[in-house]
Image: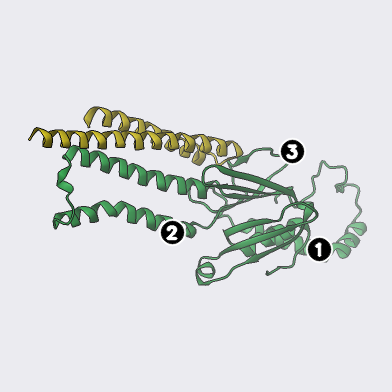
Amino acid sequence: MPDIFVGNPKDSNFPKKESVSESEKINKEQVEEPKSIDHRRQIVEFQADKEHSHSHLFSSYCEKPSGVTFADKLENEELLLFLRKHLITNVPWIVSALALSLAPFILIAIAGFGALPINLLPPVYITMILFLYYFFVIGFIFVHYLTWFYNIGLVTNQRIIDIDFSSLVFENVDATKLSQVEDVGYKQVGIIRSIFDYGNVHVHTAGPAANFEFNAVPHPERIINIINALIGKTQHIHV
Amino acid sequence: MFDQIFDTFSALTLIKVLFLVVNGMYVAFLLVVYKQSRAMQAVVNDGTSSQLLNTIALLNIIIGVSLFVAALIVL
C-alpha cells in the first residue's frame, strides 16, 4: 500500500493496534466507512496501473517512477506522477525533420533533369555541404526532442511542480503545495485528443500562487482523479 | 582563361569561408545546447535517459568540431 495515502505507523498520531479494543474498532469502521471505502478505491485504482511505472526515453506518463530525481526535493517527498506532453504531439516536427531529410534527394533528382547547376561545385564540396546539412537536421531533431523531454509536470505527495523549458534559453520552474490547490480540471477537445486520450490539466491554486497547466498530457482524467484524491476530493471535474 | 580559374578559385574560397563560419556558429549553438542539457539535468534527472541526452549533446559538439577541422583540411 503506498505510504502517501496511509498514515505513518511511527507517527504519534497514528492509532496503535494494541490500544484499540474490538468494540472501538467496529464503531470507528462504522463511522468512517464511506470515506475509507473511497480512499481504498483510490488506492486500488492507483496501484492497479503497473504498465506506467517505468520511465524511459519516450515515456510521457509515469506513476511512481523509479530513478527520477528533481532539484529542491523536500523531506519525505515522494514522486507520484511524472508527466510530459503526449508522444503524438511530436508528430509535426518529426514530419518536418523527414521532409528536411528528403529535401537533398529531391534537389538531386531535379538536378538530374538539368534544372539545377549542381555540377558547378567539385564533389568534395557537395559531400561536405551535405554532411553539414544533415548535421543541422540532426540538431533540429535533437533540440525539439530536448524541448519535449524537459517540459515536465511532477505531482508529489506534497507539491505540484511545473517545469517549462522552451527555445533552449527559457526555463521556468513553478511549484505549489497541495494544500494550496483549490480546484483541478481538464480539457480534452478534438478527435485526435480523444483517440489518443490526452488533454490539458488545469490546477487552480489559492491566493497569489500561479495556476498550473499541464498541456497535452496523457490520461488527464486519471491525473485529476489522483490529484483530487491527494487534496481530499473525490469528484471528477470537467472544465 | 586565368581569369576564369581565378574566379572559380575565389568562389570556392568564399564557399569554404562561408562553410567554416556557418559550422563555427553551429558549434557555438551546440555548446549552448550542451550547457542547457546539463542545466536541465540538474533540475530533473531522469536517470540514464538524461545522461544519454548529455552524451548525445557532447557527441554533437565533437562531430561539429570534426567537421570544422575536416572542412579546413579538405576544402
Q: Within 10 angstroms of label 1, few (less than 14), some, or many (20 or more) residues?
A: few
Report whether A74 appears left or right of A91: right
> What SS does tag 1 mark?
helix
Residue at x-position 44% and y-position 37%: B29
In the image, residue B59 above or below residue A157 = above
Marks 3 and 2: same chain?
Answer: yes
Q: Within 10 angstroms of label 2, few (less than 14), some, or many (20 or more) residues?
A: few
Which amino acid, mark 2? Val
Which amino acid, mark 3? Glu
Q: Residue furthest left?
A: B1
x and y, in percent, of residue A29 in the image:
86, 61
x and y, in percent, of residue A161 in the image:
67, 48
Which colour is chain B painted? yellow
Provide the chain ID for the residue under circle 3.
A
Mark 2, residue position: A91
Mark 1, residue position: A35
Report whether A130 appears left or right of B6: right
Mark 3, residue position: A75
x and y, in percent, of residue A75 in the image:
74, 38
For the residues labelled 3 and 2, the Cα–Cα distance comes to 39 Å
Identify the image quadrant of the C terminus of chain A: bottom right
Q: Earlier in the sequence, mark 2 or mark 1?
A: 1
Q: Is residue A72 among what the camera can see? A: yes
> What SS does tag 3 mark?
loop
